[in-house]
């Protein structure tokens, strides 16, 4: 079902004949792991499967590539190897059972040999792209090595797509110059359709929930939302910077004192652009941010020894009411310190309100690493229309930024590429 009259301007993998073609698939397999190297959240990997399957079932072969963690380009480091990702991929789909992780670096001579011999339906995974110094630097020389591996390029790495790394920008630019198709994968397509779609053609009322620790992190997003959304519900620690700026005592709550002027200027901008900003009227306060700390609900001013760590019951009721009347909901940032009980209460209650609104026909999109995990922990993942796999990327999209890596892909209307095999 198409939710928005929003057209993706980028050519997609479904629009390319991949039979007997080797496709370089830049994925975002940058997933969290526990101390034993086990992947603790495999969403990014699972959500890339539709693109992988679509290429393989149409007779293409795949060169999969990703970064993982933050190695500094000093060659292979076992701690950052993609081996755990390879193991997981093999277990997720019968088509990936014989997937091979090749080489210790993606530039090893053996990689070119292995990819040259790929048969339709076969898949290899390259080692961590960030083992190469050139990856973070956006190096054309690295892109030139990678470009030899495939006849086409597909970007499905939404979580990294706000970056200008070699595999994300120089590589598609180079491959397009070689007449090879460079397209968006299905996950990337879904992310852009939802995140840009809600911003550009929302059904109204359009409500945003913005929370998290710092106003400074969300400044550009808040400004971009003013005039686009009808109401912004502000929660989390950032609410205390707004409240302090307005003269309300906030006790020992987390405040960015250097952002007080900025907070006032956002309130002014919202007013000018007819966006209502709602701040919490009551708070669940604690004396420290530890589980089991003494808590109390405070209305209005917070006494000197107390910290606001979650929205209070009256605010939960008010925000839930606004959310349940919404037709489009965008959420970035938890409204409390949800990792520490009982300060998860507000965030979890709002997750429930969004699920109800979604069941009644609203479109709901959650973005940002913390928000996605809060929604999952609250059991809301399947009740939202879309939960973004991007943290920084989804925030930058809310800020209205252009992504060079997406602009580097083929335009949707461009057809008739020369087939490099002929
Ligand atoms: P962000 O990454 O900016 O979305 O911030 C998320 C973090 O903000 C989470 O780790 C929350 O625990 C934290 N947070 C949210 N509300 C509060 C609060 N009232 N006081 C302290 N930390 C908070």
Image (tube, helix red, strand yellow):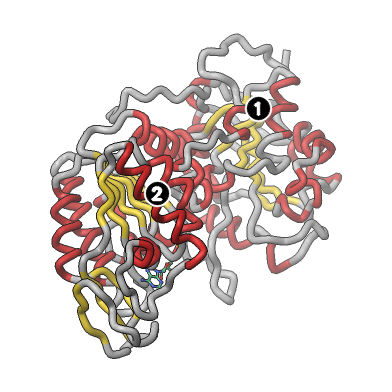
Looking at this view, is 189 or 217 the one in front? 217
> Residue 416 location, x and y as percent?
60, 9
Write down the residue under mark 1.
152
244 or 42: nearer the viewer? 244
Q: Is residue 109 left or right of residue 168?
A: right
| 52 sits left or right of 82 in the view | left
x, y percentage for residue 36? 58, 75
Tell which circle, 1 or 2, labels the residue nearer the N-terminal end. Answer: 1
User: Which residue lies at the image location 26% right of the left edge and 85% below the top edge?
Assistant: 295
Residue 332 placement (x, y as % from top left):
38, 53
In which quadrant of the rendered view does residue 299 lie?
bottom left
- Give the label, 1 or 2, closer to the camera: 2
> How many other residues sit within 10 Å of disc 1, few (<14), some (14-19) or many (≥20)?
many
Can see residue 81? Answer: yes
Name the residue rendered at 40%, 22% in the picture.
7
Q: Which residue is mark 2?
A: 266
Q: CA distance from mark 1 to mark 2?
A: 45 Å
Left/right of residue 82 with respect to residue 318 in the rendered view: right
Residue 238: give x, y in percent of width and height. Answer: 39, 63
In the displayed structure, 18 sits above or below 228; it is above
Q: Are marks 1 and 2 in contact (CB under 8 Å)?
A: no
Image quarter of residue 202: top left
Q: Is residue 113 visible?
A: no
């Amino acid at each position: 079902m198409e939710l928005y009259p929003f057209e993706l301007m980028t050519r997609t993998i479904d629009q390319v004949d991949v039979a007997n073609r080797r496709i370089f698939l830049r994925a975002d397999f940058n997933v969290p792991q526990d101390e034993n190297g086990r992947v603790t959240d495999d969403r990014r990997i699972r959500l890339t499967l539709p693109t992988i399957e679509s290429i393989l079932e149409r007779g293409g072969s795949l060169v999969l590539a990703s970064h993982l963690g933050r190695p500094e380009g000093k060659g292979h480091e076992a701690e950052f190897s993609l081996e755990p990702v390879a193991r997981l991929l093999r277990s997720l789909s019968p088509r990936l059972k014989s997937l091979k992780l090749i080489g210790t670096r993606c530039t090893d001579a053996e990689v070119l040999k292995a990819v040259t011999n790929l048969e339709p339906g076969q898949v290899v995974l390259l080692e961590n792209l960030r083992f190469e110094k050139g990856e973070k630097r956006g190096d054309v020389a690295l892109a030139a090595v990678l470009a030899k591996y495939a006849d086409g390029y597909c970007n499905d790495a939404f979580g990294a797509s706000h970056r200008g790394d070699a595999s994300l920008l120089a590589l598609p630019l180079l491959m397009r110059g070689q007449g090879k198709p460079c397209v968006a994968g299905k996950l990337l397509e879904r992310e852009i359709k939802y995140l840009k779609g809600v911003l550009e053609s929302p059904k109204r009322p359009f409500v945003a929930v913005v929370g998290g620790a710092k106003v400074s992190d969300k400044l550009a997003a808040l400004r971009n939302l003013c005039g686009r959304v009808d109401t912004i519900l502000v929660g989390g620690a950032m609410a205390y910077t707004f409240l302090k700026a307005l003269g309300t005592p906030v006790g020992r709550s987390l405040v960015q004192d250097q952002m007080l002027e900025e907070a006032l200027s956002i309130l002014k901008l919202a007013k000018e652009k007819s966006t209502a900003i709602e701040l919490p009227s009551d708070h669940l306060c604690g004396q420290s941010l530890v589980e089991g700390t003494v808590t109390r609900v405070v209305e209005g001013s917070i006494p000197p020894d107390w910290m606001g760590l979650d929205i209070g019951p009256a605010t939960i009721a008010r925000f839930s009411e606004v959310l349940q009347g919404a037709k489009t909901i965008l959420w970035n940032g938890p409204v409390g310190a949800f990792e520490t009980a009982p300060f998860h209460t507000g965030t979890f209650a709002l997750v429930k309100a969004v699920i109800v609104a979604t069941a009644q026909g609203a479109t709901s999109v959650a973005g940002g690493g913390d928000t996605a995990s809060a929604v999952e922990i609250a059991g809301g993942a399947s009740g939202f229309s879309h939960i973004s796999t991007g943290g920084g990327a989804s925030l930058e999209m809310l800020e209205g930024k252009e992504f060079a890596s997406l602009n580097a892909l083929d335009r949707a209307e461009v057809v008739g590429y020369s087939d490099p095999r002929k």
